[in-house]
Amino acid sequence: EAKAKGRNTFHFYSQELNAAANERLHIENELRQAIKSQQFSLQYQPQIDSRSGKIVGYEALIRWNHPTEGGIPPTKFIPIAEATGLIVEIGTWVLKEACRFSSVLKSKGYTADISINLSARQFKDANLIETISHTLDEVGLPPSMLHLELTESMLMGDVEAAIEQLKEMKKLGVSLSIDDFGTGYSSLSYLKRFPVDVLKVDRSFVKDIPEDSNDMEITAAIIAMAQKLSMKVVAEGVETAEQVAFLQRNNCHIVQGYYYSAPLTEQQVFAQEPSIMRVAGN
Ligand code: C2E
Ligand code: MG
Ligand code: MG
Ligand code: MG
């Protein structure tokens, strides 16, 4: 009985595995094509100082518009690009494109700080420093305007190697952020050794404010800790006026989320008055 059941379960499981493996292989092949035929674009989500309603920068977020399958979300294809190594080429394109956008904004006199997401593979890539410095030179962007977002899991593997790489990045003059903070397992004793400028509080802590009092405690504690470590704090996924008010009361003024704006196309950024989004409470 048990044996037969086991075999069936295995059969079922392996079918599922097969389907997953096939989909992966399919996406991998399509990704190679996507790089060649320029199916990627970037959207830019404003980051706002909630005290003034002013945009202080943008986060670049990749979009894949597949010719027959339509939009494929980054949460679906980035892990596959990462596993296959294709992310290095895609990430280099993202870096270039985002810096180009930023320099166009700057030339129009607008706020132009730009954040980009780095993947684990890129962070470990021996050419990363060279790629960043080459791109900044080519585009003519001041390094301080470029913010690179990393995650805790990328830093916690080989901590000493990670610290060395972060130091090399800092030497270029760029700013470093820890994305999705609170969802990984970074040790607080290491956190103070990382030369990081910004903590981004993950959306999972923000989304149930003000209903979830634990999340409010955690968010307040992350903000306080960041400030003790002289880091700036950005809250992600801010969707309501109540959340903005809570964050303001707790000294986190830079926010990003649908309350102010979804990610925008480059045309949308230029079409709107790009300095003032909305003053909190309005
Ligand atoms: P992330 O870096 O944490 O980006 C924030 C995600 O939250 C984005 O999803 C954004 O569209 C979404 N978001 C922003 N505000 C709100 C809000 O108020 N409510 C909700 N529900 N969501 C909000 P997106 O664009 O689908 O990106 C997902 C993840 O994919 C990113 O998370 C990042 O980890 C990764 N990613 C995106 N672009 C790139 C890229 O160019 N390179 C790499 N390596 N990863 C990327
Ligand atoms: Mg990010
Ligand atoms: Mg994030
Ligand atoms: Mg997040």
Image (cartoon, rainbow, N blue to C red):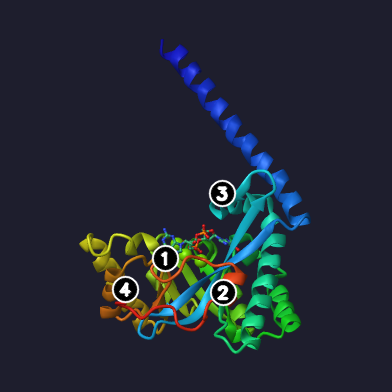
What is the crowding at mark 3: few (fewer than 14 residues within 10 Å), some, or many (at least 20)?
few
- The answer to whether the residue labelled 4 contacts the one labelled 2, judged by CB atoms less than 8 Å apart, is no
Q: Could you give the CA–CA distance between mark 4 and mark 2, rounded to whole angstroms? A: 22 Å
Residue 160 vertical position relative to residue 175 in the rendered view, above or below? above
Q: Which residue is mark 1?
A: 258
User: Hey, what amino acid is under mark 3?
Assistant: Lys
- Residue 160 visible in the current orientation: no
Which one is earlier in the sequence, the residue at label 3 or at label 4?
A: 3
User: Hey, what amino acid is under mark 4?
Assistant: Val
What is the secondary structure assignment of the residue under circle 4? Answer: helix
* Tag in front: 3 or 4: 4
Q: Could you give the CA–CA distance between mark 3 and mark 2, rounded to whole angstroms? A: 26 Å
Q: Which residue is mark 2?
A: 269
* Image-based side of 56 in relation to 60, left or right: left
User: Hey, what amino acid is under mark 2?
Assistant: Val
Dot 1 beta carbon under 8 Å from ligand 1: yes
- Residue drawn at x 60%, y 61% as measured from the top left: 62
Which one is earlier in the sequence, the residue at label 4 or at label 2?
A: 4
What is the secondary structure assignment of the residue under circle 1? Answer: loop
Q: Which residue is mark 4?
A: 244
- The answer to whether the residue labelled 3 contacts the one labelled 4, judged by CB atoms less than 8 Å apart, is no
Q: Could you give the CA–CA distance between mark 4 and mark 1, rounded to whole angstroms? A: 11 Å
In the image, residue 151 lies at what x, y percent? 50, 65
* Tag in front: 3 or 2: 2
In the rendered image, which quarter contains the N terminus?
A: top left
